Image (cartoon, rainbow, N blue to C red):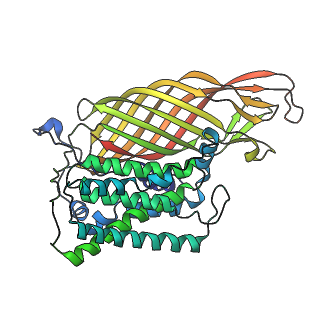
Amino acid sequence: MKIKILIIFFISCVLLNATMTYAQQDSMHLSLYHTPLIKINNTKWDKFKSSKFYQTTYISIPLIAGGLILKNESKPFRTLRNDYIPNFHYKYDDILQYAPAIAMVGMKIGGIKSRNSWGRMLTADAFSAALMAISVNAIKYTAKVQRPDGSNYKSFPSGHTATAFMTATMLHKEYGLTISPWISVAGYSVAAATGISRQFNNRHWLSDVLVGAGIGILTTELGYLLADVIFKDKGITRDYLKFNQIDPYRKPSFFGLYMGFGLLPKTLSLSSALKLKTSTGSHVGLEGAYFFNPYIGIGGRLAVSTIPVTTTGKKEDLCDPVDMNLGHIGAYFSYPISRCWQIGSKLLGGYNFSTKSVIVPDAIYVKKRFQPGMGTGASISYVAKQNFGVRFFFDYSLSSASFNLEPNSQLNISEKQSIHKLLHMMTIGASTNILF
């Protein structure tokens, strides 16, 4: 189960920050003090990473695979949406999906040279759009997955997200790889915002968005490959930027968005006769740290989580989940074990805020309350590109919540009382990060 969760979140989080950028590399003299645990040499994996197949598929295929794995695991994230923004209904994503393409064409019209000439660019983009539209609609009308809002059976995959990531990849190829990687960051951020907004609007499941993003990226890669076959060396107007080799001893500062499954003990005992049952919840947050050297840094995280709970004889959907918000700061630690892999840990402290939740109407509810909290965890990080990394983590957080009990004969509650419980939460997941 834990392995499955790690696979799921390696892929699901790529959606949120899938940007490929570069960083300037400081020269460092390697000494015995800097010798890694594993000798750093070029390996077969390094050669594979430079292959055309890897460059074409290393983001899109994991996204698609993750969406397929996640098809039956999307409910916890919809619960998070329903708890925090149940009335979110805006249509800006209908336009936002085209924003990267509008920026690309606008820059081209403005006289800023891109990777390709007008003819070569439009040919590649036409192939990409055709492949994307055919793929998305063929799957939609075959899979017939119902939307979260129940409006129709065209949920899987997300066409808006596929379009957004297609246009973002076009912008990335034309300008992000030739002028500035921050153009790619902007394009993919807009695409990610489109995908997230489709979930906020209750129009798509997380799996729909992941597969849509993967299709958008993959079909654009294929569209540009077809244009390469047709035009060969003709129509190239700007060279790609040069990227430095990844330095394992760089400062591993990062910022990104993470997602995970939140796990509490299976039961929370409020009294000898009253126990709450918990199930797997969702945990989403922002996390970042600035490192002073390759090993020690300072940073923090902001996150929201929701844990479904129920009592014996009660259906889970009749009970509100326990919702927690947290903000922690503290020390971060890292150590390089190879050119692209680091192990890490952290020790954080701060606040936790529990929102008011009705576990059983007129019987059990959670108080709205601020209280101190702390957290730690272990992680392993992979640097996929100069400024793009993926981190797998296992976190532990200590917080608390206050449960108010009202007299209820069915639950054997004889008197009104307030019970304070420590909550030991474990989170297993992954994040994608911009490295700087």
- Left or right, 143 with respect to 259, comes to right
Q: Is residue 57 above or below residue 362?
A: below
Q: Position of residue 425 (x, y in %)?
A: 56, 36
Q: Residue at x 52, y 24 (%)?
A: 351
- Is residue 245 shown to the viewer in this render? yes
Q: Position of residue 300 (x, y in %)?
A: 40, 30
Q: Position of residue 110 (x, y in %)?
A: 23, 53
- Is residue 9 shown to the viewer in this render? no
Q: Residue at x 57, y 21 (%)?
A: 371
Among the 4 quarters of the image, the one containing residue 293: top left
Quick one: quadrant of the C terminus?
A: top left
- Left or right, 275 with respect to 330, comes to right
In this view, the residue in front, 11 or 113, is 113
Among the 4 quarters of the image, the one containing residue 366: top right
Q: Residue at x 29, y 72 (%)?
A: 123
Q: Residue furthest bottom?
A: 230
Give the total number of marks visible in the rendering: 0
Q: Position of residue 133 (x, y in %)?
A: 45, 70
Q: Is residue 157 above or below residue 291?
A: below
Quick one: quadrant of the N terminus?
A: bottom right
- Left or right, 371 with respect to 405, comes to left
In this view, the residue in front, 237 or 64, is 237
